[in-house]
Image (cartoon, rainbow, N blue to C red):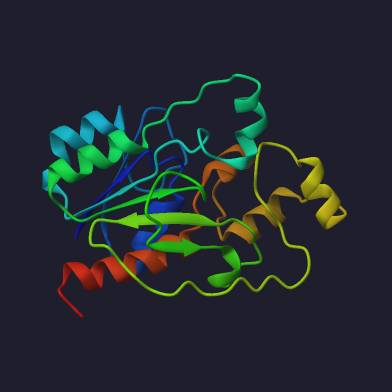
Amino acid sequence: MRLLDMFCGAGGASMGYFRAGFIDITGVDVAPQKNYPFEFILGDALEYAANYGRKYDFIHASPPCQAYSMASKGNRNAGKKYPDLLADTRNVLQSIGVPWVIENVPGAPMRPDFKICGCQVGLQLRRERWFETSWGWFGLSRQHHHVGPVVSVVGHGTPTWVREQLGFNPTIKQYREAMGIDWMNRGELSQAIPPAYTEYVGRQALRFIKGIA
């Protein structure tokens, strides 16, 4: 199974798919990713997918989320413009014709076939993400079950609301443990998808690809 990870960052999503059973993984990102753990291509993800996407069995895409995220809301209200590539990403993926998943933040203009938070996949982490699939999944989302304050990985420092919730500034070790990621720096963690999320989605994707009901 060949998997393409568009807008791959430092590889949180890719690692989850690897653990789910995708072995041949390629990531594409417009910024260099020295810590990406699989084959990496530096370039425009949309252009690469449009040109080469058909040689892959499955495509994951995480277009920039700042146009919709709560963490960027203050900057948007102040007039800052962020790239909005979600619709363009969906159009490219639909034109390719292989199974795909798009990931983004709650509130993004997408159909959330999966809604996953850390508490639902065994992590002490508050970080919900939505996943839209090409095959139209329907399943009841598990209830959140955070027990007490848990880490939220946002921004590049410790936002005031995170510090107030926890009562302390988390260390890089604590951030990595919360995300289930041990190879990224603080900046990379703030943009990453916990591998446990895409491991779960990837197992469902493999069932679809293999035609298992």
Compared with 190, 209 (above or below) is below
Q: Nearer the viewer, residue 90 or 180?
A: 90
Residue at the (41%, 30%) spot, across then down: 84
Instruction: Indicate the quadrant where residue 120 lies.
Output: bottom right
Q: How many numbered marks, from 0 up?
A: 0
Residue 101: x and y in percent read 31, 53
Residue at the (45%, 55%) spot, across then down: 130
Q: Nearer the viewer, residue 41 or 89?
A: 89
| Quarter placement of the C terminus | bottom left
Residue 181: x and y in percent read 55, 56
Residue at the (34%, 61%) spot, across then down: 18
Residue at the (35%, 55%) spot, across then down: 132
Compared with 55, 147 (above or below) is below
Instruction: Indicate the quadrant where residue 109 lies.
Output: top left
Residue 59: x and y in percent read 25, 50
Q: Report whether 9 appears left or right of 185.
A: left
Q: Report whether 4 appears left or right of 102.
A: left
Q: Is residue 189 visible?
A: yes
Residue 152: x and y in percent read 68, 53
Q: Nearer the viewer, residue 40 or 52?
A: 52
